């Protein structure tokens, strides 16, 4: 078994890890987009309630409205923290993919170099066989 053939399982495993890492990266990107979309919705709700002065409402209705706006503010703060968390997870996934991809690329390069060496070696061996079977010229002199 050649060196390239012996390394192939490791290259296959590295390729699988790289594919898994890119899938995780895509999932993390989608999670961040969802979290950002949710934050935008919360801010939209907040803006709607802030613009509506609530004219003609009773004191208890105004207090309920104020408490609701405060809950929205807490939800916005929580969602901002969630976005920060998703950004960290995305960066970790990006780093994991870069590492896996670099390993895959390196192993593929080594295997290709081994295959090139094996081809050159085989070509030299075949050329020697041809030279050995070829007609012999008598020595001149």
Image: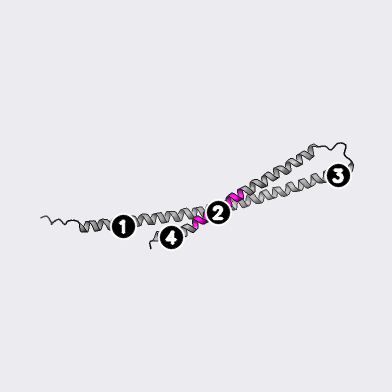
Q: Which residue is mark 2?
A: 21
Disc 3: CA contacts within 10 A as few (<14), some (14-19) or many (>=20): few
CA gap between label 1 and label 4 equals 19 Å
Which disc number belongs to residue 63? 3
CA gap between label 3 and label 2 equals 50 Å
* Image-based side of 64 in relation to 35, left or right: right
CA gap between label 2 and label 4 equals 21 Å
Query: Residue at position x 46%, y 60% from top?
Result: 9
The quarter of the displayed image where residue 39 is located: top right
Give the position of the C terminus as an image quadrant: bottom left
- Closer to the N terminus: mark 1 or mark 3? 3
- Closer to the N terminus: mark 2 or mark 4? 4
Magenta part of the chain: 14-29
Badge 1 element: helix
Query: Residue at position x 62%, y 48% from top?
Result: 30
CA gap between label 1 and label 3 equals 87 Å
* Image-based side of 4 in relation to 18, left or right: left
Disc 2: CA contacts within 10 A as few (<14), some (14-19) or many (>=20): many
Which disc number belongs to residue 122? 1
Where residue 53 sits in the image (x, y, percent)?
A: 83, 37
């Amino acid at each position: 078994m050649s060196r390239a053939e012996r390394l192939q399982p490791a290259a296959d495993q590295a390729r699988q890890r790289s594919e898994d890492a890119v899938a995780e990266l895509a999932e993390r990107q989608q999670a961040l987009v969802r979290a950002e979309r949710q934050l935008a919705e919360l801010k939209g709700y907040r803006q709607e309630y802030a613009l509506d002065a609530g004219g003609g409402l009773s004191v208890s209705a105004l207090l309920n409205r104020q408490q609701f706006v405060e809950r929205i503010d807490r939800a916005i703060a929580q969602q901002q923290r969630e976005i920060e968390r998703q950004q960290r997870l995305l960066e970790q996934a990006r780093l994991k993919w870069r590492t896996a991809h670099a390993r895959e690329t390196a192993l593929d390069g080594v295997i290709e170099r081994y295959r090139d060496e094996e081809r050159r070696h085989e070509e030299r061996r075949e050329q020697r066989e041809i030279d050995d079977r070829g007609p012999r010229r008598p020595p001149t002199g």
